[in-house]
């Protein structure tokens, strides 16, 4: 006989304790061949109480290593720009330290980039998140003033390399400060077309969280929101087992177990589709990770939707809450006869017509 998944009701908050008790009991009594996995499914959700959202502004040409909905760890590579190669033959005439400050308007429709020589003493108080007014000085020396009202979204150190080409024109290259190699690029040296001037900038996550990518036309913004784990089915434990009189009684007699999810007093196994969703949530069954397309956020509470991606693909549910800021919806789906809230990206659901 093939093992099936059964749902065991417990007291809320004691799911993990019941899971551990069941595993110990089945092992100690020699019922290993009758029982498979015992799980308490959890999902990772954005921590709405956390006020800090990590942001990275990257050019549209940068190669992305994550997508909306990805969960990342601190130090994970998010994106990288192409390496910088010499466009023409020439001679390195100048290498200087610069600071690049990017200011964005309040409506997020326009940005202004300022490349300021370190010799002009860029204002050290100008950091990411600082609000700027038109006309505000950006450096203590030289004439650098903000031309727009807005907020600073990026500050980085660069090496500005000026190369005089063979026809007398000057090519300018900006290399991330940390990627500049002074042993390979020096003032007065001759470089050839195609030679590596510096490696492109790489963007790494500073914290653990869930990714959201916004396409802002001339650039992209990678956001990382802090996450937390939440019981997907509070008060329930899932057991993969061969149901016999002995195994049924072992489960029923375990402390903090209330009962099986039953019909007519008999434990009811999960339907195939429900079991498949459970296995996907646990990472035990592979499924195609569909690319989430950009969609217009026009969902409203109470409307019916179909889940088109993820562990619950194919399920139909009702929108309970909407979160336009994170482009997410909370959908109520029915599994083993019980309504369960699932948080999904807007691109993972579609309206029922």
Image (cartoon, helix red, strand yellow):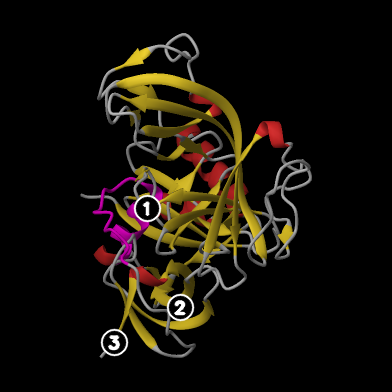
Of labels 1 and 2, earlier in sequence is: 1
- Give the Cα separation between the discs numbered 3 and 1: 33 Å
Marks 3 and 2 close (CB-CB < 8 Å): no
Most foreground residue, 253 or 35: 35
Q: Residue at x 26, y 71 (%)?
A: 314
Residue 297 position, x and y percent, is 42, 79
Marks 3 and 1 close (CB-CB < 8 Å): no
Residue 229 position, x and y percent, is 58, 53
Q: Which mark is residue 192?
A: none
In the rendered view, does 99 fall on the left or right side of 127? left
Q: How packed is label 3: few (under 14 Cα within 10 Å), some, or many (20 or more)?
A: few
**Relative height, residue 187 to residue 241 (above, below):** above
What residue would you read off at disc 1?
60
In the rendered view, does 261 fall on the left or right side of 114? left
Look at the numbered disc 3 and give the secondary structure of its residue: loop
**Relative height, residue 77 to residue 279 (above, below):** above
Q: Which mark is residue 352?
A: 3
Most foreground residue, 201 or 279: 201
Look at the numbered disc 1 and give the secondary structure of its residue: loop
Q: Which residues are magenta?
A: 274-293
Q: Which quadrant would the C terminus be assigned to in this image? A: bottom left
- Give the Cα separation between the discs numbered 3 and 2: 14 Å
- Give the Cα separation between the discs numbered 1 and 2: 36 Å
What residue would you read off at disc 2?
332
**Residue pushed farthest front?**
168
Residue 200 occupies quadrant: top left
Q: Is residue 161 visible to us here? A: yes
User: Which is in the foreground here, disc 1 or disc 2?
Assistant: 1
Q: Residue at x 39, y 78 (%)?
A: 264
């Amino acid at each position: 006989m093939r093992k099936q998944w059964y749902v065991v009701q417990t007291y809320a908050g004691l799911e993990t304790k019941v899971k551990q008790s069941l595993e110990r009991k089945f092992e100690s009594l020699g019922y290993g061949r009758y029982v498979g996995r015992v799980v308490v499914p959890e999902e990772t959700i954005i921590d709405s109480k956390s006020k800090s959202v990590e942001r990275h502004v990257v050019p549209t040409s940068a190669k992305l290593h994550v997508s909306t909905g990805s969960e990342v760890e601190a130090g994970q590579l998010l994106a990288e720009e192409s390496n910088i190669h010499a466009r023409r033959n020439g001679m390195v005439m100048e290498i200087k330290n610069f600071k690049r400050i990017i200011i964005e308007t309040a409506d997020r429709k326009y940005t202004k980039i300022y490349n300021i020589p370190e010799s002009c003493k860029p204002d050290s108080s100008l950091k990411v998140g600082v609000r700027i007014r038109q006309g505000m000085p950006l450096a203590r020396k030289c004439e650098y003033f903000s031309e727009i009202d807005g907020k600073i979204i990026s500050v980085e150190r660069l090496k500005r390399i000026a190369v005089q080409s063979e026809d007398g024109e000057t090519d300018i290259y900006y290399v991330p400060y940390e990627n500049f190699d002074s042993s390979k690029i020096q003032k007065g040296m001759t470089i050839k077309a195609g030679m590596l001037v510096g490696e492109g900038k790489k963007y790494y996550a500073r914290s653990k969280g869930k990714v959201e990518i916004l396409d802002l036309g001339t650039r992209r913004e990678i956001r990382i929101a802090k996450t937390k784990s939440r019981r997907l089915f509070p008060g329930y434990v899932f057991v993969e087992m061969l149901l016999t009189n002995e195994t049924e009684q072992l489960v029923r007699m375990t402390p903090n177990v209330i009962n099986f999810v039953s019909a007519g007093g008999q434990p009811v196994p999960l339907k195939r589709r429900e079991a498949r969703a459970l296995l996907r949530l646990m990472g035990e069954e592979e499924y195609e990770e569909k690319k989430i397309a950009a969609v217009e956020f026009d969902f409203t509470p109470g409307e019916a939707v179909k889940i088109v991606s993820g562990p619950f693909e194919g399920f139909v549910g009702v929108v309970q809450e909407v979160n336009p800021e994170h482009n997410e919806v909370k959908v109520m789906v029915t599994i083993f006869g019980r309504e369960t809230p699932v948080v999904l990206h807007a691109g993972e659901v579609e309206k029922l017509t």
